[in-house]
Amino acid sequence: MQALADEVSPPKDQPDKKAALQVMLGQAKQMLVQVGKVEDCELKETPLIHYSDQVRRLPESTLWLWADRGRPVLFCKIERIADAAGTTKSWQYCCSPATADKADVTWGRNFRWRAREVTFRWQPLPDAPEPREQARARLTQMKNLAREFSGKTEQTPVNTEQEMRLLASPLHQYASPKQDVVDGAVFGLTSNGTNPDALLLIEAFGEPDAKASWRYAVVGMTGDAARVSRGDKQAWSKEYSDGPGDYRSWMWYVAAP
């Protein structure tokens, strides 16, 4: 794993935000993302969120997105892990696909990860109102739908449970006419600061000559056990992940600075 971090040397300890952001962008640019037959998915070169998580000692972190024709297919966190004094210990990566196709991710010539399972699923929202024609009105609808979801995380070894809260604004909005996506948004659910433990995707989807309707999907972005509910019904869950590794449908690894 060492070579992954060596390609772009991180700044010295206690980096300013601009320098840290450039380092993390450099790391993201190394990644070649292939999904199904799409060989070169597009990196959005501005992070969806630039955050810190003092509870987990992550002073500088970012969330990145790769897309196919505008539609998200992979999310990856790049996080600086620090000790109590703020000294950089390592860089941490959490990559989770947002597609029904298997993802294939390459970091230059150094490392390759291939998903062996697909757990991402779109689910309908049949009781939601029809998507409005105006983009601003649809955004209001997506925000209202997102507020219907809640979640919890649990650190299984120490048996501690925390409520997740919905971040106030969507992290990203998108559309993909070629894939019949009229409108879509990515929302974050977090139990610590603004570090998203789960991502909630809501989109208006409609095939040609058919009315669009709302649907949702959830992408996990944490090693903790987590579950997301809509009202009193569970909508999604993941088990606790015992440290970095290949989890078949997503990847978590740590590289030394």
Image: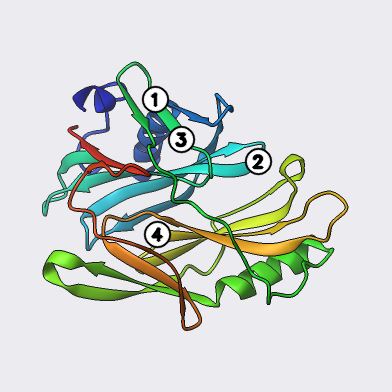
Question: Comparing marks 3 and 2, which lies closer to the viewer?
Answer: 3
Tell me how far mark 3 sits from mark 4, CA to CA.
21 Å
Residue that lies at the very extreme toward the right in this rendered image: 209
**Measuring 84% from the left and 49% from the top, which residue is drawn there?**
208
Q: What amino acid does circle 2 point to? A: Gly
Secondary structure beneath label 4 = strand
Q: Nearer the viewer, mark 1 or mark 4?
A: 1
Q: Which residue is mark 1?
A: 106
* Mark 3 residue type: Ala
Q: Earlier in the sequence, mark 3 or mark 4?
A: 3
Task: Give the residue drawn at x 76%, y 65%.
Answer: 136
Q: Secondary structure at mark 3?
A: strand
Residue designated by label 3? 103
Give neighbour class at mark 4: few <14, some 14-19, many 20+ (Cα, 10 Å): many
Q: Which of the marked residues, 2 or 4, is nearer the chain's N terminus?
A: 2
Secondary element at image label 1: strand
* x and y percentages locating residue 246 in the rendered image: 27, 40
